[in-house]
Each structure stands twice: as C-alpha cells, then as structure tokens.
Image: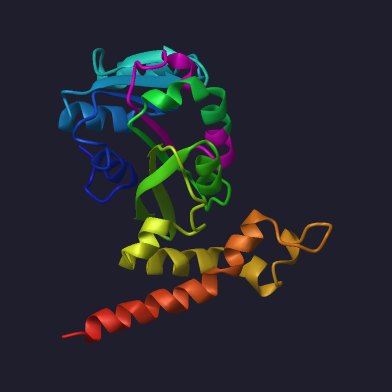
C-alpha cells in the first residue's frame, strides 16, 4: 500500500466512492493499480500503456489478475461507457488534452477525469473547460523539493474559465497552495527574475505560462494574508 500522502495515494483517495470502473492511462510501473486493488477491491481496473513490454513487466512483478492490462494509446484502450473514471498521472498537460480530445466520445459517460501532470501546467485547466469538463476538486502533492497539481473534473453543461492556479484551492484557502506557490517561485526563479522575457510572444503579450507566472506573487501574498487572518481569528 502506498504512503497516505504520496502523489498516487492522494489520486486514489479522490476517486468517487460511487465509481465502478477505472482506467489508468500510462500505468507505467503499476503502483496505482496495485494500490487500488488493495484499497478499492470493488473497482474494475483497466491499465493502458503504449509500451509492449509493460504488461509482461507488471505481471512478473505483481502477478496476474490485478487489472486488465491493455496495449494502446489513450482512451482507445476501452470502449465509451466501459469506465466512469479516467486517470492521467505523470503525463504532460498538452498530452492529456490531446488524449481527451481524441477520446471525446468517452466524456459523456465519465464521472471523473483525474489529472496529475509531472510539472507546472498552464494549458490543462483552461483546456478541460474547453472540453466541457468542470473542475470539481483539487489537491497538491509534495515530494522533496517539488509539488504536483491533482485536478479532478467532470462533464458539465456550462463551464467557466477556471483560475490558472486552481479555483477550488483558492476558494477554500487551501494552506497547501502557499507551499506550492513558494516551490514554484523557486523553480521558476530564472523566468521571474528576467521579467518573463522568455514568455513574451511576437506581439509583446505573455503566453499562457507567462500569464500564470505573472499572478504568482500577488496570489502568494494574498494567501499568506488569509492564513495570518485565520490564525489570528478567535
């Protein structure tokens, strides 16, 4: 079983208690699938991978019968309506959006799309909204000097453009957001110290990452102030 505060365990904890079938796109070493087999044995589990040796390696490590391991790209590994939860852990934001776009036929059947890109994203949240997926929950996982967004979304009739740093994290004044912002400020210090020059487009405007980074300092100040007020309140 995975440690409670690990990235994959936090993803697993966000799966709806009403979920019936989960597909892990790009299951890699299979840690999430084995964790779900232990903690959510009622779930039907599917693992999708593009690497031909992945299933053999998984079964030689964990044995057979844990999950239905399939070879293929993105949501092509299952039929529309076969699963109600899709997990993308460790894939870049643009890759996730490409796979969701290619698998649009699946979206009406989904209860949750859970995404956890390996680095700071700037395309994922707005891209989910463009696909008609509304953010329903958010969390942040930490590992050593890095932080990871975990974004849960679901199909909705009308979806507003979400705040780039996480609408739910900000609304609930999540204290983890402060640490996340501090970590990203350090990781992106080079870009910030250069006035985001590398994110200037030909017309002088900032690209999506530049726009997101331009909000960092003000949001961090605001979140710290909110935290101080909460500690000072009777």
As for residue 92 lying within the magenta part, the answer is: yes
Please report the residue visible at 16 percent of the width from the left and 24 percent of the height from the top.
Answer: 41
Left or right of 154, for residue 1: left
- In the rendering, at what x and y percent does residue 157 appear? 43, 37
Q: Quadrant of the N terminus?
A: top left
Q: Which residues are magenta?
A: 74-97
As for residue 25 lying within the magenta part, the answer is: no
- In the rendering, at what x and y percent does residue 34 appear? 25, 28
Left or right of 163, for residue 204: right
**Occupied quadrant, residue 154:** top left
Question: Is residue 125 something that shows in the picture?
Answer: yes
- In the rendering, at what x and y percent does residue 70 appear? 41, 13
Question: Is residue 56 something that shows in the picture?
Answer: no
**Occupied quadrant, residue 111:** top left
Please report the residue visible at 48 percent of the width from the left and 44 percent of the height from the top.
Answer: 117
**Occupied quadrant, residue 204:** bottom right
């Amino acid at each position: 079983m995975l440690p409670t505060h690990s990235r994959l365990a936090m993803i697993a904890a966000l799966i709806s208690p009403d979920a019936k079938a989960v597909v892990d796109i790009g299951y890699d070493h299979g840690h999430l699938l084995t964790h779900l087999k232990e903690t959510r044995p009622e779930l039907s589990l599917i693992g999708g991978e593009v690497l031909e040796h992945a299933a053999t390696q998984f079964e030689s490590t964990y044995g057979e019968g844990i999950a239905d391991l399939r070879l293929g790209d993105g949501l092509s590994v299952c039929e529309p309506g076969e699963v109600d939860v899709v997990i993308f852990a460790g894939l870049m934001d643009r890759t996730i959006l490409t796979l969701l776009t290619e698998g649009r036929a699946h979206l009406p059947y989904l209860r949750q799309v859970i995404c956890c890109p390996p680095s700071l994203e700037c395309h994922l949240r707005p891209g989910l909204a463009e696909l008609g997926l509304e953010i329903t929950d958010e969390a942040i996982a930490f590992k050593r000097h890095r932080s990871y967004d975990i974004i849960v979304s679901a199909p909705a009739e009308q979806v507003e453009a979400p705040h780039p740093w996480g609408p739910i994290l900000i609304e609930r004044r999540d204290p983890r957001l402060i640490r996340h912002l501090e970590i990203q400020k350090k990781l992106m210090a080079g870009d910030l110290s250069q006035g985001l020059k590398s994110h200037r487009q030909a017309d002088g405007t900032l690209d999506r990452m530049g726009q997101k980074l331009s909000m960092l300092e003000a949001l961090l100040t605001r979140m710290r102030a909110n935290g101080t007020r909460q500690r000072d309140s009777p």
